Image (cartoon, grey):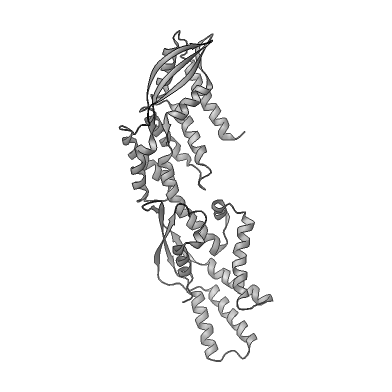
Amino acid sequence: MRKSKWVEIFLLSLLMMAVLCSCKKEDPKEYANTQIEMITSGDKATAQLLLERGIDSVKDSYIEEFPEALKKDYRNFLEAALKQVEFQILDVKKHNADYKVSVEVSAVDVGETTGKTDEDQAKKLETTDLAKEVSGLLKKDSSLLDTPVRKEKKTLTLTVKKNSDGFQMEDAGWEILMNQILYDYMQPYKEIADTLEAGRYLQASLDASLKGQVTDYCKFTGETQEEAQAEYEQSFTDSSEDPGFSGEREARFEQALKTMFASSQYEVGIPRKADGDGYVVPVTYQPNLSLKQAMDTFQANVNQGMYGSQDQAEEGFISVLESYAAAPVYGETQTKEVHYSRKALRFTAGENEDYQNLTDSLIPTE
């Protein structure tokens, strides 16, 4: 059993223990009212349980785990949201040895309540610190909970059993309540995490294609590290086949190119959400002019008649390339922006025109 499932069971047990402590009532309606009122008064155990479920629901969507430093602020936010849930006991009917309690619930739609503020904040992030950005956003969102957007009122039927201690609600009843009181409550987190993820994906794509660092890239694409590494190696093998090198020269040519590409200087900035379903990620870089200057130097050598044969020309070209790879030359610092659509984010960076322009600018040949 997964650790998160054990945590959930433990938290649900704590919640039910709190219920049992006050369950010695002769009236099932009063019992149900007391227990639901406890939950909607901002109960810490309920908020913690919802948070654990929320974290579990998003954990496979991002390469960064939910920050431990954010849990307290998020739980406090959920406690405040729970206080806005409204309910009314409509009816209690005896059903065999049990009681069927009809409860009208006016749930809070957190996503609709905070959505516009969350989206606006994602357009102007100040850092790439997920915990800091979400924590700051929750402070703004908390004030919005005073006038929440509510879901349409819904009538729930809960089963209450009488026992030697008084009354107890069935586990299924607790599940129904947990699923029907707060909607889309991970929205603030997801809005910021989605935006920052665009930057992390661009960073991972550049690191994989230029430096052969494929670990994070594989987390996005689902490829194995062996597959991604093979693609990286193949890109340089294809390059060495174009001029027709073979043997030792082919290996030297590939290594010189790898060294040049790996020495690329770039820094992925703070991403921001764009209008619609897109993201914009700025990248500051210094173009690596080594490949262009190596080609220019080799051409100048050819024009001066330095090579008397094809063999000498091949050796000369590789030597020039190795020289510039060992001592790269950079141009002035520049910035480009890469635009992604939400649908394309994880799969088509290589087909993205902005991305292609960026990589061409990092190591220009013209």
* Left or right relative to 253: residue 66: left
- Res. 45 in view: no
**Residue sitting at the far right:** 247
* Left or right relative to 299: residue 277: left
Numbered label tally: 0
- Residue 126 point in image, percent of width and height: 36, 51
**210 up-or-down from 347: above or below:** below
- Res. 333 in view: yes
- Location of residue 233 (image quadrant): bottom right
Which residue is at a point 65% across and 85% down the rendered structure image? 311
**24 up-or-down from 56: above or below:** above
- Residue 307 point in image, percent of width and height: 59, 89
- Residue 212 point in image, percent of width and height: 57, 62
Front residue of 209/252: it is: 209
- Location of residue 36 (image quadrant): top left
**123 up-or-down from 338: above or below:** above
Which residue is at a point 44% across and 60% down the rendered structure image? 267
Which residue is at a point 61% across and 71% down the rendered structure image? 238
- Residue 313 point in image, percent of width and height: 60, 85
For the N terminus, the quadrant is: top right
Which residue is at a point 62% across and 54% down the rendered structure image? 224
* Left or right relative to 234: residue 335: left
Front residue of 77/329: it is: 77
